[in-house]
Image (tube, coloured by chain):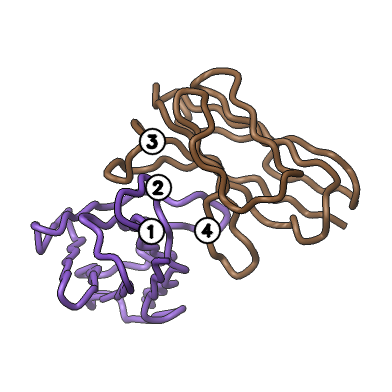
Amino acid sequence: DTAVSQTPKYLVTQMGNDKSIKCEQNLGHDTMYWYKQDSKKFLKIMFSYNNKELIINETVPNRFSPKSPDKAHLNLHINSLELGDSAVYFCASSQEFSSTYEQYFGPGTRLTVT
Amino acid sequence: SQKIEQNSEALNIQEGKTATLTCNYTNYSPAYLQWYRQDPGRGPVFLLLIRENEKEKRKERLKVTFDTTLKQSLFHITASQPADSATYLCALPPGAGSYQLTFGKGTKLSVIP
């Protein structure tokens, strides 16, 4: 009965490759997010989706492309991976698109680019 | 844009004592603020939300205060236990009308038996 799940848990790949991370939530939430947590532990918002539609795209390179096939899923595709993309990526969801609602986070995907 | 400062990167306290963590913010004063706990290798877990008119909120051994004049929130854990060891993050909207959250860098709390 995992609330927010992500796959894979670990991803090791070489520079220049393309990879995807999948996220699913079974909470019936309308809003989903992608966050990046770098080596300094800062958790930074990348994208916010509400009802399958992109609401906010922070200053993220366009090599990163989120896709939401339905409200329960938000995948992240990354093209031409760079060393600086190495980080832990967290998917999260909230009941609605409002900062008054708590966010539920997935377990994270540790991406290592070599 | 909003800056969030959490008092120290690491805080060590003795078991049974009260841990007090600080979250200071600049600029915009939000109407509410959230606290999360993050364990190593895991995603953050929501703990408490406090609104500007609440001043104080409690949940079991946790207590959060919110002082909009000082632009500060304090997070207390009473009768701390080694199991409370984790990183604690505060989060608030980055600006007026914003629907998303900006997270602080967190304070790593270690409760020593």
Q: Image check: A85 left or right of A4?
A: right
Quarter of the image for residue B77 reads bottom left
Q: Which residue is mark 2?
A: B100
Q: Which residue is mark 1?
A: B94
Instruction: Tell me the colour chain A is drawn in.
Output: brown
- Circles 3 and 2, Cβ within 8 Å, touching? The answer is no
Q: Is residue A91 above or below residue B75?
A: above
Identify by letter the chain in purple.
B
Residue B73, x across and y down, in percent: 23, 69
Residue in view at x 31 percent, y 49 percent: B97
Who's the residue at 40% across and 47% down the image? Answer: B100
Three-letter code for the amino acid on which mark 4 is drawn? Leu
Task: Assess disc 4: are there few (<14), some (14-19) or many (≥20) residues with their C-alpha within 10 Å of its C-alpha.
Answer: many
Identity, as a three-letter code, of the amino acid under mark 3: Ser
Q: Secondary structure at mark 4?
A: strand
Secondary structure under badge 1? loop
Label 3 vs 4, first from the N-terminus = 4
Residue B102: image location, x then y, percent: 42, 58
Residue tagged 3: A94
Q: Do tag 4 and tag 1 residues touch (Cβ < 8 Å)?
A: no
Check disc 4 and report the residue beneath it.
A43
